[in-house]
Amino acid sequence: MALYLIALFLLSPISTISAQLPGVAEAPKRELRAVWVTTLNGLDWPSSKATSRTGIEKQKQELCHLLDQLKAAHVNTVLLQTRIRGSLIYPSQLEPWDICLTGQYDKNPGYDPLAFAIEETHRRGMELHAWVVTIPAFKIEVAKKMGKKSLLSTHPNLLLRHNGQYYLDPGQPGTADYLSAILADFLERYDIDGIHFDYIRYPENANTFPDGPTYKKYGQGKTKTQWRRDNITSIVRRLYNEVKAKKPWVVMSSSPVGKYRDTRRYSSKGWNSYDAVHQDAQGWLREGIQDALFPMMYFTGDHFYPFAADWQEGSHGRYVAPGLGIYFLHPGEKNWALPVITREMHYLRQQGLMGQAFFRSKFLTDNTKGLYDYLQNQFYPYPALPPCYHWKDSIAPEKPQGFTLEGGLLRWRADVESQGGVRYNIYASREYPVDITRAENLMAILLPKPEYRFDRSTLLLYGLHLAVTAIDRVGNESEAAQLDLDGGSAQKGRQRAIPLNPLGLPVK
């Protein structure tokens, strides 16, 4: 503990970290609160197979239960593994269905899991980002099981074998073309909020990766390490620009290796983004070809804190929400004590990083070492809006108008002018007007429809005054429409009161 506090003091001498960590941190109104939901081998979802109507329903119910748990913990961003290893959880002519859904590659599960997941995530006021594994393909022993839509059948010239697995060759121009086609295919058909790149890099032990012939053909006089780094950056740049040209509100992010480079005082011990796997992730932020990074910081002590500070210093005005390895809390892994993670969470918030992501959802929803309880009761006591990606658009939508109330259902006119559509936030307070800058007044976020149902218990819990705001797809929030629901007179210039009796029922 003493060494930990000394390290924090050296990293941030003007902070009061040691004094603040034991207490409950002040929860911000905006924060990236993300969870990776792993579909590889059904690790997080699905645990059952969709081989019958009962199986389909069970699979859907399981996902809904998972999303309910995440919503109750005030998570706002779901990173759902959508492309696994050259296979998918949605119908496509480009690649086969993944085995996790039915127990067999390229077997239709009888419904569209991605469409279902998007609808249910949005229904709960959360964002869904499609987690796309990019460069790794599949293990050699399963390649033939994937059928005629396997990369090995359709694009064998793009694949290289390395350490028992096939990989796309980042140096081949056709690799960027192929990944572009994958993204364009589902971007056009699905209302996703973000695309999240995983393994957008060269593999481990990159010095033995067999891309010598590709380098000889395309190297153009560069060193091999710089050529490789440029290859990855070129893919990231192209995919970012193409997605933004079609749907500029879609958040583009990636999960680089957790240490960018050696810092001046701390070594990465040979495992870092820039040198080991040729990811210039901070360069992507500097160039503006990523909106956010979720670096995989599954470390402790001096392997975590200096490198988290380095990510923040190199963020160039974009967002960094480090990934925390909560699976290491499990006794079957490293059996970390809960404070290992909670201290990291407090540090990230204090240092101004935009949030955190948890790998992976099962270890959160299983309440490993009490982490779920800690989030729900202390660290995430209120909902939080995702950050505003203001560099694309800073124009807020119009505030909601045209309110009607019937049977406890509050409705208003939808804003149909905003690009990509808008969602809505509900605030409540016993004070009028409702202060929408305070996180504790948030009652519901990212509502997909211009309506909200409340009842007597809601009013008794939160108070008799509501405020409604519109929020666009990049996070710009409108002015608040203030609703005085206690039957008192609305002040001049404010929203006309909707009179209710003390039980929250409309006056007849």
Image (tube, rainbow, N blue to C red):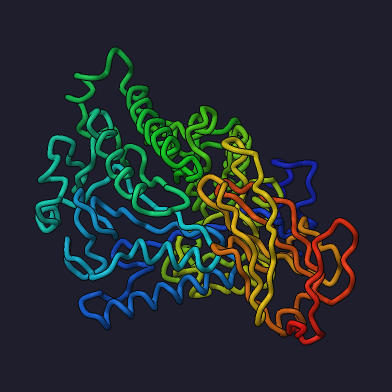
* Residue 313 position in % (x across, y down): 63, 35
Q: Nearer the viewer, residue 297 or 390?
A: 390
**Residue beneath the point at 60% across and 53% down:** 415
Above-or-below relation of 173 to 196? above
Q: Quadrant of the C terminus?
A: bottom right
* Residue 262 position in % (x across, y down): 52, 33
Q: Nearer the viewer, residue 199 or 441?
A: 441
**Residue beneath the point at 47% across and 49% down:** 296
Q: Nearer the viewer, residue 167 or 382?
A: 382
Quarter where residue 286 is shown: top right
* Residue 473 position in % (x across, y down): 55, 49
* Residue 250 position in % (x across, y down): 47, 45
Quarter where residue 183 is shown: top left
Q: Is residue 276 visible?
A: no
**Residue beneath the point at 75% across and 59% down:** 481
Above-or-below relation of 104 to 278? below
Q: Is residue 201 left or right of residue 249?
A: left
Above-or-below relation of 453 to 86? below
Q: Is residue 387 left or right of residue 139?
A: right
Numbered label tally? 0
Q: Quadrant of the N terminus?
A: bottom right
Q: Is residue 474 visible?
A: yes
**Residue beneath the point at 90% across and 62% down:** 491
Q: Is residue 361 left or right of residue 341?
A: left
Q: Which residue is farthest top?
A: 221
